[in-house]
Amino acid sequence: MEDTIVAISTALGVGAISIVRVSGKEAIDIVNKIFKGKDLTTAKTHTINYGKIIEKEKEIDEVLVSIMKAPNTYTGEDIVEINCHGGIATTNKILELVLENGARLARPGEFTERRFLNGKIDLIQAQGIKDLIDATSDEKRALAMNQLSGRVSSMIDDLRQEILEKILANIEVNIDYPEYEDIKKLTNEDILPNLIDIKNKMEKILQESKNGIMIQQGIKTSIVGRPNVGKSSLLNALLEENKAIVTDIEGTTRDIVEGEILVCGVPFHVIDTAGIRKSDQLVEQIGIQKSLELIEQSELVLFVLNNNEPMTEEDKSILKKLEHKNKIIIINKTDLPTKLELNGIPEKECVWISASNHTGIDQLKDKMKELFSLEKIKTEDPTYLTNANSISSLKNAITSIEQAIQGIEQEMPIDMVEIDIKNAWDELGIIIGKTYQDELINQLFSQFCLGK
């Protein structure tokens, strides 16, 4: 982090204002070389300075330059932000001048990466910044703000402290100073209750974090059924737009058509699939195979039946494939005479709709809400882990604690049990960035936009 970086921090295009952000120990000196106005090297921190950006003697733009000196800045380094007139040519020209005078173009997320490496935030807060930028619902925004505020980090840090103070510290004293008689001799039974308590707390966090993943990543949902039962009409009704082609000809949908809806702030990624039937046409066969694969991959399947036709063997075959899936059985075309018999399908699993008339869609959304307990998620305090890497580390920590408990039950020496406990402590440290690998850091910050 010895060099000085620069990037455009606003969306590039026509607008009132663009911001070129510079961070590093030479940030002020570099911008001062192309600034006509007050000497920026003498400017007080956290001030805004009026002037012009120049190339030699030619004026490029009229600007306001913000000076923010370390350490009380976003990155912890000196930061200069050039507020110029919005526009592609002007903004790019100023960026070009800063680069020519000694700065380097920042990588995506490098400003926030420096913020992390300078100890301003931990990894969970860094993820919260990205999630806040990407938030498309109020629920996602609330999740991101909880991460950014440090509440989630404190939850994990408290667990680490509990492991350290109640278990590891006592083990170390007993191992390092066995000759002291006034030290309580630690036995496996002394630490077992604490290990069980910590394991229960971690499992509770893991269980609740499934809600966070659901809000952040959404629920993959596929609409399946045989041809011409109204799958595409259902997708259009859910999306409230004519996205999928609807005809009376069987096999119209041959490729994947998808969209997203929000139910209680949780995104459902809805995919319309090709009608499942026996077919001799190669293109349709490929579409059908994709439909079968999506059934396996989906977290929710909307299985559509035609109210106006008796149940077929193809319907029964599809239903058989859904035995162990989260599913809602949709009886479509209720505006037509009823010829369908449920044949033992529980009515509580069914919703009756007319996709073409847009009736029953609200009831379907209520069923989706009920199936995933979305009302409960909406009203609970959203202090969850939402990142796949964090969830993986938490699972590893739980596994290590379970192995420690198993070691105690098998009467293993306490110093052997300590290895698993330390592993759990380290895994929790990975979540908040107290211990980390360079690959993990690079992977996280590469997902940020340029200039953040």
Image (cartoon, rainbow, N blue to C red):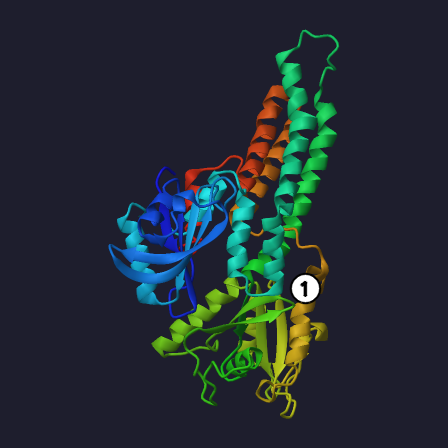
Q: Residues within 10 Å of mark 1 (few under 14, many from 20)?
A: some
Q: Is residue 406 above or below residue 303?
A: above
Q: Is residue 271 above or below residue 312?
A: above
- Give the left or right position of residue 89, taking residue 238 as reference: left
Q: Position of residue 265 (x, y in %)?
A: 62, 66
Q: Position of residue 447 (x, y in %)?
A: 43, 53
Of the pair 238 and 79, the residue shown nearer to us: 79
Of the pair 36 and 187, the residue shown nearer to us: 36
- Give the left or right position of residue 223, taking residue 60 as reference: right
Q: Is residue 304 above or below residue 57?
A: below
Question: What residue lies at 48% left-to-right and 78% top-to-bottom?
Answer: 275
Q: Position of residue 301 (x, y in %)?
A: 57, 69
Question: What residue lies at 64% left-to-right and 41% top-to-bottom?
Answer: 154
Q: Position of residue 71 (x, y in %)?
A: 50, 39
Of the pair 135 and 44, the residue shown nearer to us: 44
Q: Which residue is mark 1?
A: 374
| Local secondary structure at mark 1 | helix
